[in-house]
Image (cartoon, coloured by chain):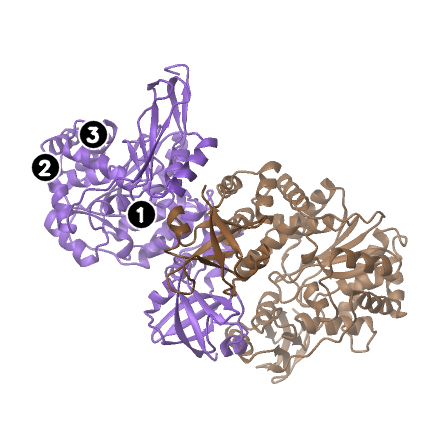
Chain colours: A brown, B purple
Amino acid sequence: MHPSGLRLRLLGIDTLQEHVIYMRRDCHVCRAEGFDAQRRVEVTLRERHIIATINVVDTDLLAPGEAGLSTRAWQTLGAVANDHVTVAHAPTLDSLSAMRSKIYGRRLDARALDAIVGDMAAGRYSDMHLAAFLSACAGGRMDVQETIDLTGAMVKVGERIDWRRSPIADKHCVGGLPGNRTTPIVVAIVAAAGLTMPKTSSRAITSPAGTADVMETLTRVDLDMTTMRRVVEREGGCLVWGGALMLSPADDVLIRVERPLDIDSDAQLVASVLSKKIAAGATHALIDVPVGPTAKVRTEEEANRLQALLVQVAAAHALQLRVMRTSGAQPVGRGVGPALEAHDVLAVLRGAAAAPADLRVRALALAGELLEFCGHTVAGNGNSTARHLLDSGVAWAKFQAICEAQGGLREPGIAPLREPVSAARTGFVSGIDSRRLARVAKLAGAPGAPTAGLEMHVQLGDPIERGMPLFTLHAQSPGELDYALDYLATHPFVTLSDEGET
Amino acid sequence: MHPSGLRLRLLGIDTLQEHVIYMRRDCHVCRAEGFDAQRRVEVTLRERHIIATINVVDTDLLAPGEAGLSTRAWQTLGAVANDHVTVAHAPTLDSLSAMRSKIYGRRLDARALDAIVGDMAAGRYSDMHLAAFLSACAGGRMDVQETIDLTGAMVKVGERIDWRRSPIADKHCVGGLPGNRTTPIVVAIVAAAGLTMPKTSSRAITSPAGTADVMETLTRVDLDMTTMRRVVEREGGCLVWGGALMLSPADDVLIRVERPLDIDSDAQLVASVLSKKIAAGATHALIDVPVGPTAKVRTEEEANRLQALLVQVAAAHALQLRVMRTSGAQPVGRGVGPALEAHDVLAVLRGAAAAPADLRVRALALAGELLEFCGHTVAGNGNSTARHLLDSGVAWAKFQAICEAQGGLREPGIAPLREPVSAARTGFVSGIDSRRLARVAKLAGAPGAPTAGLEMHVQLGDPIERGMPLFTLHAQSPGELDYALDYLATHPFVTLSDEGET
């Protein structure tokens, strides 16, 4: 190998997470090594290495002897202008053979999965490789042992927190139900009860908001490990973004592809959720599985399959796990989108008269179950204990204390553009399509635009007069508002019928 | 929708086939529309539209009000500097829902496949989407009817040639056998017999050379439809690259992802091969299926499955098809790589004493079978007729005439760097791993570097003395030669054993 030096010029091209190196077609390295566009190469700066994709430059964007990097590649290498990088052929990734054998339908053993996940976490897979892997593992093509091994591989490549105590409570919702933002309320109640609940959450993958997106409108969530530990030592709980903590970093790599592809699978979902829980040091995890015709889990049969997989994989990794099935028939609360959901959470915690009752009831059920699961109350008493902690204001005080410890509580904003959408006829609300609703909220800008999304004014069964507002779109830019409206024109998500009950 | 104008600046960034638009983060369009990095958008210039991925620029690479395009996007739009483009949100692709349902394991009907293939051919899928689709369809996840419908969809989105006569002969090798370059010899023989064989070939997908790559070292292959028709009218045959003819253009789109992923599946292979044959107007197609432990088809069982699928899909599209199974135990001929294989082809056609006998025998068998299949000779006489056409020099004259009609015959070159690799011990050649051999030839630069590849000096069963050259690497750049040698150090592909026969 003859790696050769090139001087870095700051181009400032943001490709999100994909590592790109820009090289002149006539540069001596391209010519000596036979490099062309889209070739994968290894770029070295001092002691750091990345795998990057070549984009070839045919103009004077770069001077002879110069190379450029995408913003992410620049950051990962810790580059400054005029640094010298060397560029060589990317090493042969043996794990790609294993990935291909999975595509062809064969099963993967623990060693193969360790290799694949290790290369992913190290950034050696292109977006194309990641997409192929995800697709190959979806649709029931991973068996239980593969899912156990994938989970283990994902835990191994990252950090793992040891809290040196037990129980450590955790919860997770498998999602698909817009507005189902119970986590901040549950953490506040459980921590208020004196239990330990160090909650790390992700940003949205395919939904209009993740818990981390919602919490970010209220306080700082990008804490490092030391700060998070300090918050948990002081308050018994936290509500932080897990992305900076290197817990299951392969999961963060996969998410960047899951999002544009809008796919996930049972195996991937279970490995993603449980690897994060195990890495975060949880001993008791409660999983909320909403079931409904347009939720992520659509039937009891699917829920049974997912539950069985969750239980088996958790058991193999010595994690105690319970599943709570909830109704996934319609969205929860009123807001959908980071700030809009934060407003709902605050209303419940503050005991506001106008707080959405469905969100409150669900949060109490989950918190009560966790209190019982962790042995804080006897079976049957969890819900009443949770209600007492919420209604007495103790949970709200705990939430404020957690946010203060994380960097201060602030009020979430309101979008500058708001457009009510009204009923075209009189009747009863007979259906709300959660998938389309989520789509509309995303087109309106959520979660990238924190105050964007939509606010529901109706629930299933409500009688509606023609012209009544069904929901209000919230957007931060006119383009996004129009795009959501365009989609709505052909894809309505609220169904009205003549009959009140069906 | 509020598309807004941006002035184009030539950046000259080659991303191969992926359409990229470069936009300043602070540009009015990004801000009005809420665009950020990796967002898919529709770019319009006069009456042309493309779907492109945004890369965000944070420096003065672009002036305010300017945008840049990747080279391919620039070409597709027919842009000149200072043209004004408008940029809007990409339309929602309904076919992506169908693609996702395939990923989840459901089957696709003809309508869904038409929509997917139509969007692919129109360049609306990102590389990530293509990778996910390919992976979802691999490993036996497409049934026969889906394969028939996929083939039909691929034919429909492209051109289809009507030769207004019958039979139109065609052949194809499913590949995996390095050096198996029979096509130019078969076309020369069949056309010399007076049959019509308008052969369109592809460039290499995952192999070190495709027939188009080999022919390109001998003559012009990128003919347009009119020129190709003229060649065929005059000579009864041609040997051209199909890529410029818009025959099954979706296949060309998929290939750009198959290549870096190095995957293909029975369904994809059959749809790819047969859609090209049907679109090219073939009535009689002969498919060469090499079977061997390291060929693409490894067992008789796999060959049976592939043959059954080929026959059923061809029948559904009224194409007559025969399969000929050949030995895939070891490479064919001596050279592997575009120019090296061209030298072998010329030697056979010229009747050179040193011509590789195995290549000659296989080409005669295939040509003989085609002569019988098309009714030119009675069953049993094909091979001797083919041999006569070859040995008499008639086929060589026909080959020269075809090349002359395509733009002139030239001698292929020889690589400047050649490195013999010798046996480390004495013994017998007991195995040649075609996959590793192909890998080495590609690392040496084939097919991008036309004279790169390798030249075999031994065959299975040959007795070898320590220090005898087994093969010679050919490369155009020192980096590539070293890379092939590095790989060889840990991945030898010739196995030597003590016993002559096993």
The residue carrying mark 2 is B394
Sequence order check: which comes first, mark 2 or mark 1? Answer: 1
List x then y, in percent, for residue B80.
33, 72
Sequence order check: which comes first, mark 1 or mark 3? Answer: 1
Q: CA distance from mark 2 to mark 1?
A: 28 Å
Label 3 sits on what residue type? Ala
Horizontal side of residue B279 vs B12, given as left or right: left
Label 2 sits on what residue type? Val
List x then y, in percent, for residue B265.
42, 43
Q: Residue at x 75, y 68 (%)?
A: A359
Chain holding disc 3: B
Horizontal side of residue B240 vs A197, given as left or right: left
| In the image, residue A368 above or below residue A92 | below
The answer to which quarter of the image holds residue A317 is: top right
The residue carrying mark 3 is B355
The answer to which quarter of the image holds residue A370 is: bottom right
Label 1 sits on what residue type? Arg
Foreground tag (2 vs 3) = 3
| In the image, residue A177 above or below residue A310 | below
Dot 3 crowding, Cα within 10 Å, few <14, some 14–19, many 20+: some
